[in-house]
Image: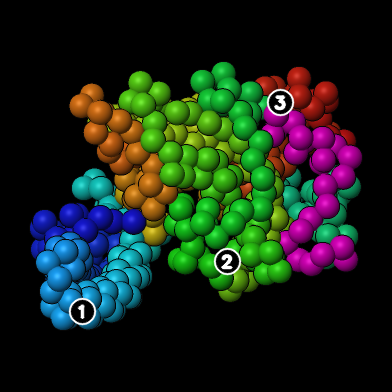
Amino acid sequence: MLTLKQLRDDKAEAIRRLQKKGVDAAPIIARIEELDDKRKALQSELDNCLAEQNKAAKQIGALMGKGAREEAEAKKQEVAALKSRSQQLQEESKVVADELQAAIVTLPNFPADIVPEGRTAEDNVVVKLVENYTEISGEALPHWELAQKYDIIDFDLGVKLTGAGFPVYKGKGARLQRALINYFLDCNTRAGYQEVEPPILVNEASGFGTGQLPDKEGQMYHASADGYYLVPTAEVPVTNIFRDVILEQSELPVKLTAYTPCFRREAGSYGKDVRGLNRLHQFDKVEIVQVSHPDSSYEALDKMVEHVESIVASLGLPYRILRLCGGDMSFTSALTYDFEVYSEAQQRWLEVSSVSNFESFQANRLKLRYRDDNRKTQLAHTLNGSSLALPRIVAALLENNQTEEGIRIPEVLIPYTGFDIIK
């Protein structure tokens, strides 16, 4: 979440930057200023009231010592009135503070200066293109037909067990899933990320900390009896490890990786773009998360992009890297790079990773700080990236590596699968 300082120090600049995300922030910031001024006035009156209350309470003893009982009784009534007013002011102050907080959390993060202008995915900028296309003899089958042909993914069985968007992986399809998860985790740990295995259910505070709540509440599966949410990404539990934590500057950067199944309702998604593995309600993903010093977070972002690129490139797939425009960025992100791989059979690009810098936006929600050289606490920066999401990687691997003999497995995965072809 943005800080009051970010919004009030240069209101015109704040409005300009949020406009890049398609948000008319002027009326919201005006309301925030109004509430903040009211909160300060109430706090000032409360401080004065408490000071008068303490002063009057001390005078009672002195008056009683002098035998001035009537004056002492009058002071007691004055103290009681001041106590009542103080309680009223505290209650009013809490209401205003809650309204102020509710107003601030409606505003998304500022986009970085290099974020392109634009409203939709059509305005994203391609920053790198690797056209490592494969030639397929004959007609290229889409992955859902290949899955049926080789009996490796059963979409109908998933519908029977749960519903659409919950496929069942079988035989070499299940082995390929496990191989990809292990390969991605090994790539990440070799790059210095510590592996953790977090819960896949989180509480409301965790959802708020990383910005899923209240912004994406409708997209999360909610276990209402317990108030828990199924994770939409490992970013949520892993980043919340540092909620209400003060790190030493020497501990930065912190680098973690985790595998989790991910759950997303994907309300409103329909049509050909959601067929097969293109858009699921449950899927596997490996994530990387960093907590960084603010001065080095963009250098960390560049290294994360390089790392994810090395994994995608190792699979031999055609890919491109996009810098997202303001209108296509997430609520919490300051700068995002998307990775897409090319689907030979579908003749289109499929997103497989997003790598983002959130600057201090999540840290402010999380109360995640570090102690600087002067022993003062400062907000840290948080970053995360998919490395990688499995469904569309699997879709591209099946489609791009199909041959007359079967589906060839990339060389880097063979030690993990134990086979080099799906026949």
Q: Distance between the residues labelled 1 and 3?
A: 86 Å
Q: Are marks 3 and 2 in contact (CB under 8 Å)?
A: no
Kindly identify which residue carries mark 3.
413
Q: Where is residue 382 in the image (x, y as percent from the top left)?
A: 39, 40
In this image, 401 relative to 388: left or right?
right
Pick the front one: 242 or 150: 242
Between label 3 and label 2, give the one nearer the viewer: 2
Identify the residue at horizontal 10%, vertical 63% (top origin): 12
Front-most of residues 71 and 336: 71
| 108 to the left or right of 279 | left
Tell me if mark 3 has few (under 14), some (14-19) or many (20+) residues whose alpha carbon lies within 10 angstroms of its own: some
Circle 2 residue: 219
Q: In which quarter of the image is residue 11?
A: bottom left
The residue closer to the viewer here, 213 or 176, is 213
The residue segment tinted magenta is 160-182
Distance CA(mark 3)–CA(mark 2): 33 Å
Crowd class of label 2 (few under 14; some 14 to 19; many from 20; radius 10 Å):
some
The vertical placement of 99 against 131, above or below, is below
Pick whichever of labels 1 and 2 is earlier in the sequence: 1
Magenta stretch holds residue 138: no
Q: How many marks?
A: 3
Residue 303 visible (yes or no): no
**Residue 284's quadrant in the figure?**
top right
Mark 1 or mark 3: name the one nearer the start of the chain. Answer: 1
Q: Mark 1 or mark 3: which is in front?
A: 1
Residue appearing at x 76%, y 20% in the figure:
415
What is the three-letter code of the residue carrying label 2?
Gln
Q: Which of marks 1 and 2 is in front?
A: 1
- According to the picture, the residue beneath numbered tag 1 turns out to be 73
| Identity, as a three-letter code, of the amino acid under mark 1 | Glu
The structure residue drawn at horizontal position 58% and vertical position 73%, both measured from the top left corner, is: 268
